[in-house]
Amino acid sequence: MIEGACRHLVKDRLDLTGARWGLNGAEAILKLRALRSNGDFDEYWRFHLDKERHRVHEARFAHGTIPLAA
């Protein structure tokens, strides 16, 4: 079972003819494929969108001020 899961998650995606992967890109893709495979992707995506909204909007305007245009 473990070998089959590894083949499904890793080899089928990363072992494409002519494809080259850096460590960071390969790790990111494998994490997303694992989330999708185990059914946790939707929960992760909601978490990701919440953190992105906070990073982009809420943290920027946390003190009630709007940054001035440059």
Image (spheres, helix red, strand yellow):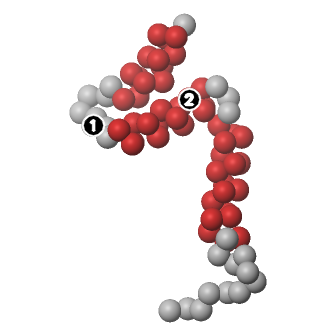
Residue depicted at x 63% and y 60%: 52
- In space, the residues marked 2 and 1 are separated at their CA atoms by 20 Å
Closer to us: 3 or 19? 3
Q: Which badge, 2 or 1, is on the more N-terminal residue?
A: 1
Instruction: Specify the amino acid type for callout 2.
Output: Ala
Q: Which of 47 and 20 is in front in this view?
A: 47
Q: In this view, does 60 lie to the left or right of 22?
A: right
The residue that disc 1 covers is 20
Amino acid type of the residue that numbered disc 1 sits on in the rendered structure: Arg
Badge 1 density bin: few <14, some 14–19, many ≥20, Cα 10 Å: few
Left or right of residue 57, residue 25 in this image: left
x 67%, y 63%: residue = 53
Residue under label 2, please give it.
Answer: 34
Q: Position of residue 10 (x, y in %)?
A: 43, 24
In this view of the protein, which residue sits in the foreground, 38 or 51? 51
The location of residue 43, given as percent across then percent down, is 71, 40
Mark 1: secondary structure: loop
The image quadrant that residue 67 belongs to is bottom right
Total number of numbered discs in the rendering: 2
